[in-house]
Image (cartoon, rainbow, N blue to C red):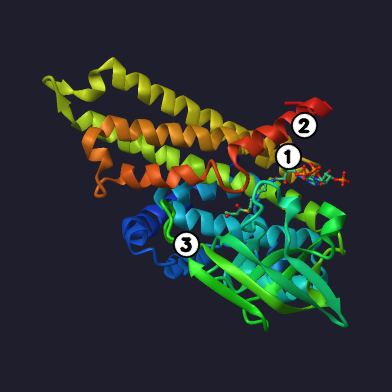
Amino acid sequence: MAFDLTLSRDHELIRDSVRAFAEEVIRPRAAEIDRTREFPVDNWRRCAEMNLTGMMVPEEHGGAGLDGVSYSIAIEEISRACATTGVILSVNNSLFCMPLLRYGSDAQKKTYLVPHARGEKIGAYCLTEAGCGSDAAALQTRAVRKGDRYLLTGNKVFVTSGEAAHTFLVYATIDPALKHKGICAFLVERGFPGVGLGKPERKMGITASGSVEVVLQGAEVPAANLLGAEGDGFKIAMATLDGGRIGIASQALGIGRAALEEAIAYSRDRQAFGQPIASFQAIQWKLADMATEIDAARLLTWRAAWLKDRGGRVSLYTSMAKLYASEACMRAAKEAMQIHGGYGYINDYTVERLFRDARITEIYEGTSEIQRLVIAKEILKGAEG
Ligand code: CAA
């Protein structure tokens, strides 16, 4: 498929302004957020002021009206400074606002899309359950229609931003025997009767992203909060993840780039055998591989974003981008740590956090194994790579 990745003047302006904002506001707090594990509400507010909470939502619905490449650029820049803030933004943008924009009724857009796109409220996405992650169609959370409402019962796990979220996009089934055709998507407010939170998860990386279990005990959801039609939920979930995976690929780019920059700075400075270690080929080859892979990942990610803006199914491209960017990011973080030697293993050094943050990009929004499965399915169907 033909595509054009020439950056416009607007793209460059977005890159420069988000980079400056991230360096001035987001980066100085990243280590502290990692240490305290406190959901960075202040970062969220500052990002909202910068119009980063509903980037691809049209202005009439409270967003910034930008394209997917701008979104990718912004998530990369924020994640380069703080991967926790990057994923919180990515979830609200890609996994909450975009399905609302695409499938929401006018009333749902007014009530939910506008405040979430403006960043007055935080959105979360509830698909995964304790017994099903990769096999999303096997979810067991039940939705039972009672008059003008649905009662939702089940538990959702690892819900990013769950601790702070105002609204959850919850996937539940009206009949597990219908498999994916029984799944529905619901807009569930945190304050609805029967909605509770479990214990916060203590994680290896992105420690402050507010991951928590969402407990639904006959949660009362107005029928008007069904997103799309009954049975549309699985396709909404999958199409939404096609966009989400661009966000995670962009987060991986940011973490990987930060790792490369740390490695370059350290290898110029660190002396061994009477010279900076950057003068050794063993180090230069690592840096060259990191830079090349990050650049290749960026091109895949921008291609996916560019194609997604033009409509149609883009699973092949978003899965390729997410797979390659996350694995390139992990390799970059590992090599950056290796270049730092023992210092890289010490909490005080940024590469130690980057290494921990990188790991999740290969797992959430579909593991690398699931991305390979999607890619293989698409190319065997005859989709173009
Ligand atoms: N867009 C639109 N429709 C899609 C689609 C897509 N991307 N993918 C599948 N579908 C449709 C298919 O066309 C099919 O439709 P029909 O019924 O009309 O034939 C239907 O959905 C079922 O498709 P499959 O048979 O391919 O479904 P499957 O059960 O084999 O599952 C899967 C496919 C790729 C494995 C999927 O379950 C998957 O992506 N799993 C990973 C789940 C995941 O990524 N979870 C992330 C949780 S969110 C998160 O991580 C957020 C966070 O914390 C930051």
Give the residue drawn at x 35%, y 47%. Answer: 353
Establish if 191 lies above or below 323.
Answer: below
Quote the CA–CA distance across marks 2 and 1: 8 Å
Residue that mark 1 sits on: 315
Tell me residue 168's x, y (percent). Answer: 65, 68
Residue that mark 3 sits on: 201
Which is in the foreground here, disc 3 or disc 1? 3
Label 3 or label 1, whichever comes before in sequence order: 3
Amino acid at circle 3: Glu
Tell me residue 323's x, y (percent). Answer: 59, 35
Asked if the beta carbon under badge 1 is closer than 8 A to the nearest atom of ligand 1, the reply is yes
Label 2 or label 1, whichever comes before in sequence order: 1
Amino acid at circle 1: Ser
How many numbered marks are there? 3
Q: Residues within 10 Å of mark 3 (few under 14, many from 20)?
A: some
Residue that mark 2 sits on: 378
